[in-house]
Every structure is written in structure tokens, then in C-alpha cells.
Amino acid sequence: MRNQIASLAALLVYALPFGAAHAQSADAAYCQALTDRYTTYVADQNEHRPAPANVGVTAAIAQCKAGDTAGGIPALEKALTNAGVALPPRG
């Protein structure tokens, strides 16, 4: 019984970093999907005169590219929602 508990504990210790890495990559993919949707449906509505740069969105996109998805995702979601654009599916 003790061996089973020790084995299970060791398995959990090794599995946790992989779960966190998967969550980070899923967030990065979602952040990229939000960025793509914003640039397609909001920023490029007029090819000849693009919409003025939104400083908050520009910063959010930079955060996503830098790996700070927790900072970038909410701002991009809000910008898309405010523009009436549906959010992409998450994960």
C-alpha cells in the first residue's frame, strides 16, 4: 500500500509541470486566435485607411507575443466584444 501511494505521489510530481505547460500553450494559442480575429475584423476594416491604433490592444498583443497571456487575453476579449465580434472558441 505504501509503495502504491509513493508511486502515485511521484507520478503526480512529474505530471504537474506537463499540465502547466499544456495550459500555457493553450493560452498562447487562444491569445493568437484573439489577435488574429482582432486584426482581421476590427483593425483592417478599411484597407485604404486602417483604424487608428488602439494603445490598449497594441499592448495586449505585445503581451501575448511576450508570453504574458494573462495580461493580454482580457484586453483582447474586451476589444472584440466591444466591436461586436464573436470570440473564437477557447481550447
Image (tube, helix red, strand yellow):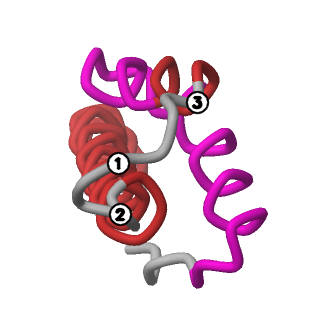
Looking at the rendered structure, the kind of residue marked 3 is Asn
Residue located 38% across and 74% down the image: 91
In the image, residue 44 above or below residue 15: below
What residue is disc 2 on?
46
User: Separation of disc 3 and disc 1 at Cα?
Assistant: 14 Å
Question: Looking at the image, is mark 3 or mark 2 nearer the viewer?
Answer: 2
In the image, residue 62 above or below residue 31: above
User: Separation of disc 3 and disc 2 at Cα?
Assistant: 15 Å
Residue 65 visible from this viewpoint: yes
Name which of mark 3 and mark 2 comes first in the sequence: 2
Looking at the rendered structure, the kind of residue marked 1 is Arg
Residue located 46% across and 33% down the image: 69
The answer to whether mark 3 and mark 2 are in CB contact below 8 A is no
Question: Looking at the image, is mark 3 or mark 1 nearer the viewer?
Answer: 1
Residue located 42% across and 58% down the image: 38
Q: Which residues are magenta?
A: 61-86
Outermost residue toward the front in this view: 48
What residue is disc 1 on?
49
The answer to whether mark 1 and mark 2 are in CB contact below 8 A is yes
Q: Is residue 7 left or right of residue 53?
A: left
As rendered, which of 33 and 44 lies closer to the eye? 44
- In the rendered image, residue 79 lying in the magenta stretch gets the answer yes
In the image, residue 42 above or below residue 15: below
Could you tell me which secondary element the residue under label 2 belongs to?
loop
Q: Is residue 3 left or right of residue 63?
A: left
